[in-house]
Image (spheres, rainbow, N blue to C red):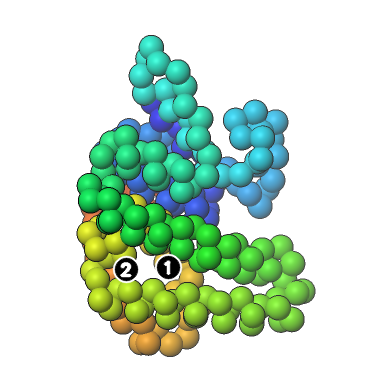
Amino acid sequence: MIELFTADTPHGLRASLILEECGLDYKIKFIDLMKGEQHDPKFLAINPRGQIPVVVDTQEPDGPTLTLAQSSAIILHYAITQNVLWPADPTEQASALQWLMQATSDMSSTASVIYTLRNLVPEHWQSTGEIFMDRVEANFSYLEGRLSEAAYLAGPLSVADLALYPIVCWCRNMIEDLDSFAAIEDWAERMADRPAVQRAVASYEGAAGKQ
């Protein structure tokens, strides 16, 4: 059994995406961040940093339990061990890693700051929000260039696309002129059409709705 401790954030959705793409059975345990459930001692015993997502994997009855945090680590672990969306070609592997890091560092950090400003310290949004919105648009422009020349970030569909998809879904609502990013929109539609993505979003939203 795989237990996924997650929350209503792009990082949380990433873990669901890879588990669905791998066809693995898992159970979602939703952590309500706004209620402070990440500080519950029971959750801190699983991840002392109090962050989501976390998987607790006991698939092998006689094997050790795997407890793994960080969405990029979760994506890479299951992609590599299950041989799903991990390119065989070393050059494509390097490209997948580059774009995965772009999604999980540059784009995710900007999105996290915007989330914090809007939801936790809205009094600071007007004074600093524009700076981070400029970064969102700069990242979108960079991605637009890549997706204008390739169907997916590393060439073939890979872990990089799974890492990016939740961030793009969240950030695109902030962009006024999406017509400027036609390649990103086409890519997002291709991703949304994947059955595994649809299952992940449905299970994720279902778990969130029960809170």
- At x 58%, y 62%, the residue is 109
In this rendered view, identify the residue nearer to me: 189 or 37: 189
Q: Earlier in the sequence, mark 1 or mark 2?
A: 1
In this rendered view, identify the residue nearer to me: 150 or 43: 150
Looking at the picture, does residue 65 appear above or below residue 30? Answer: above
Counting other residues with Cα less than 10 Å from the Cα at mark 1, is it few (<14), some (14-19), or many (20 or more)?
A: many
Which residue carries the number 2 mark?
188
- At x 47%, y 75%, the residue is 139
For residue 168, the mark is 1
- At x 23%, y 69%, the residue is 151
- Asked which secondary structure carries label 2, the reply is helix
Name the kind of residue labelled 1 in the image: Val
Residue 99, horizontal then vertical, whole percent: 39, 61
Q: How many marks?
A: 2
The residues tagged by marks 1 and 2 sit, at their Cα atoms, a distance apart of 8 Å
- Asked which secondary structure carries label 1, the reply is helix
Labelled pair 1, 2 in contact (Cβ < 8 Å): yes
Counting other residues with Cα less than 10 Å from the Cα at mark 2, is it few (<14), some (14-19), or many (20 or more)?
A: some
- At x 42%, y 23%, the residue is 58
Q: Image check: 204 left or right of 105?
A: left
Residue 164, horizontal then vertical, whole percent: 41, 61
Residue 154, horizontal then vertical, whole percent: 29, 61
In this rendered view, identify the residue nearer to me: 158 or 188: 158
Looking at the picture, does residue 23 appear above or below residue 149? Answer: above
Looking at the picture, does residue 3 appear above or below residue 30? Answer: above
